[in-house]
Amino acid sequence: MEILYVLLPVSVLLVLAILAVLGWAVFNGQFEDIEQEAVRILKTDEEKPEDKVEPYQN
């Protein structure tokens, strides 16, 4: 029975932490354009923009 005195506050703190992280993600725009990633996966290599980085040369 004494373990409930520990488990209940810990579980409440865990739920509050999860809600805080979810709130941070929503308000910082993490879920703004979720369709873009689904479309990006379906594009072929010809449709993707070229990399601006030069290849390593000896």
Image (cartoon, rainbow, N blue to C red):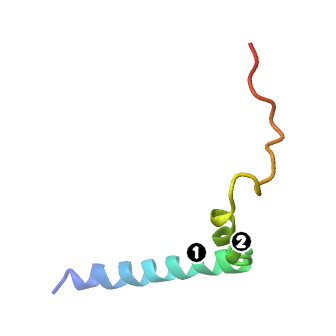
- Camera-nearest residue between 25 and 6: 25
Residue 41 vs 29, above or below: the answer is above
Q: Which percent across, then down, holds residue 19?
A: 54, 82
Badge 2: few (under 14), some or many (20 or more) residues near its Cα, within 10 Å?
A: few
Residue at figure coordinates x 74%, y 75% from the top left: 29
On the image, which quarter does residue 57 sit in? top right
On the image, which quarter does residue 32 sit in? bottom right
Residue 45 vs 39, above or below: the answer is above
Q: Which residue is mark 2?
A: 36
Query: Image check: 34 left or right of 2?
Result: right
On the image, which quarter does residue 5 sit in? bottom left
Residue 21: image tag: 1
Q: Which percent across, then down, holds residue 23?
A: 63, 81
| Discs 2, 1 touching: Cβ within 8 Å | no
- Camera-nearest residue between 39 and 11: 39
Query: Image check: 6 left or right of 54?
Result: left
Please tell me whether mark 2 sits on a helix, a strand or a loop. Answer: helix
Instruction: Pick the quarter of the image with the N terminus.
Output: bottom left
Q: Nearer the viewer, mark 2 or mark 1?
A: 2
